[in-house]
Amino acid sequence: MGGGNEVSGPDFALGIDAASLSEGAPLRGHVGGKDAIMVRRGDEVFVVGAACTHYHAPLEDGLVVGDTIRCPWHHACFSLRSGQALRAPAFDALKRWRVESADGKYFAREKLPAPERRHEGAAPRSVVIVGAGAAGFAAAHALRTEGYDGLVEMIAADPAEPYDRPNLSKDYLAGTAQPEWLPLRDPAWYRDHGVLLRLGRRVEALDVSAKRLTLDDGADVAFGALLLATGADPVRLPTPGADRPHVFYLRSLADADRLIAGSGGARRVAVIGASFIGLEVAAALRTRGLDVHVIAPESVPMARILGPELGAHVKKLHEDHGVMFHLEDTATEIGERALTLKSGGTVDADLVVIGVGVLPNVALAESAGLSVDKGVLVDEYLQTSAPDIYAAGDIARWPDKITGENIRVEHWAVAGRQGQTAARNMLGGKERFDAAPFFWSQHYDQVISYVGHAPTWDRAEVSGDPAAGDCAVVYYNGDRKLAVATLGRDLESLRAEVAFEQAIGALAK
């Protein structure tokens, strides 16, 4: 989850020489013992909290863009002016202090209260959100942050309150993150902010014209505006033996808890699939001390997405931590204590984890007659083919300006940002979804950051050395730059994100 930052540097309450502040370069310090950064933008100076409110990354290592600052780890974005968290995956605002100029110095004065907003203008009488993942929670949070005071209701098949799903395959599965770290909000938040939760409930039908949902318990729920954020489900393998009790998929908190319980009595585990989820699971279970074997059909893990150089580095990183690979191979049968491979070999395993991808859960949208094509089709404002119905997250397929195609991605940060955009558009905004897709993947002590979207590419330019934990890979299709992956280059990743967003903005005009 990241550790808290210790107080260091100058006390801004005592004053900082104006001449020592470089434009757009955060200065780390504190205000009477409260950690903070000071940032100068033109004639204005801001003092805000020093740590990202998501995983507590040091914001002095982030990137200042206009009057915002972006987190170096997971690309959350904050307003320097209001402290507000503008983009997921962070939701809590930064502390901020009033700044005063006197005698050639800048002084941090009293702490400022969080700005209050009240929505004015036309708004739906109620907003119903189907799904309680990244997109669903972000939408509910944004509605209240924007000052909407109408009914907000979240309906989800998952019985757990919204939680930090990316952590399931990382620190939580490894046993280094506590269960209380996972909820995105304390239960009191939903009560205090008037967000009604219907958990453990499935929506059986959507009547578009009547603006009504029918739930699996027979309840009818009317809506003024609707967000579909139904997420995705794991691809289930038809492999004989895949239904055995020691075979697991990882998608939900309940899945993670079952897998953790199962790993307690296991010594050897087989992971089918060398995807991001598969290899993150492998790393987590190695941290728990299990012998891990990875079985996958490709010759280099993740080479199709990251390229052979970075893929080979990830493979060696796992091998250095004791993971055994069985590549260019597949499991043809899962037995009680061993897997049979297509190559003729076997792999002993007390526990099996399957991670071979997910499929968007579009059944509700399709049965309601919404436009569906490998996802729920939405416009640049995330509205579906029906008025007042939006889609976000893993199911949304939106027009991407960089590739010139409709795309769908399965990234946590993207889902959260789409939920925020959809919420603002429900309130009458005309906000295009123009964020560049971003995700991160953790493997032991190394994190890969990926900005953009390159489902296919014909050229990859590598700079730096993956083995040294310091590299960048730029993916092209012809002369068009589609994506950038980095290892140990947080600022370069942030700058790539800004460049993509500027290109998207230019193409949208």
Image: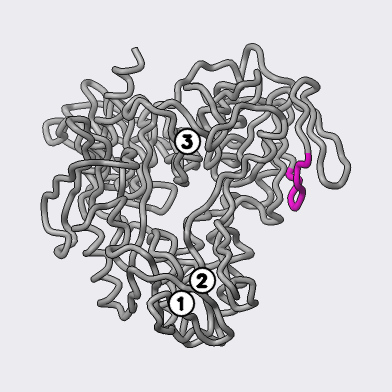
Q: Are marks 2 and 1 in contact (CB under 8 Å)?
A: yes
Q: Residue at x 49, y 84 (%)?
A: 349
Disc 3/disc 1 C-alpha distance (Å): 35 Å
Q: Looking at numbered disc 3 in the image, what kind of residue is underneath it?
A: Arg
The answer to whether residue 7 is visible is yes
Left or right relative to 35: residue 240 = right
Crowding at mark 3 (Cα within 10 Å: few <14, some 14-19, many 20+): many
Q: Looking at numbered disc 1 in the image, what kind of residue is underneath it?
A: Ala
Dominant SS type (magenta): strand
Q: Looking at numbered disc 2 in the image, what kind of residue is underneath it?
A: Val
Q: Residue at x 19, y 61 (%)?
A: 469
Q: Residue at x 59, y 31 (%)?
A: 372
Percent across and percent down for residue 240 are 59, 73
Residue tagged 1: 270
Percent across and percent down for residue 213 are 79, 33
Left or right relative to 273: residue 107 = left
Where 364 sits versus 406, above or below?
A: below
- Between marks 2 and 3 in the image, the one whose residue lies nearer the viewer: 2
Mark closer to the chain start, 2 or 1: 1
Crowding at mark 1 (Cα within 10 Å: few <14, some 14-19, many 20+): many
Number of numbered discs present? Answer: 3
Q: Quadrant of residue 294?
A: bottom left
Disc 2/disc 3 C-alpha distance (Å): 30 Å
Percent across and percent down for residue 64 are 26, 34
Q: Residue at x 24, y 30 (%)?
A: 499
Residue 353: assigned label: 2
Q: Are marks 2 and 3 in contact (CB under 8 Å)?
A: no
Residue tagged 3: 417
Q: Quadrant of residue 153?
A: top right
Q: What's drawn in magenta, residue-wise?
A: 197-204
Q: Is residue 481 magenta?
A: no
Q: Quadrant of residue 176?
A: bottom left
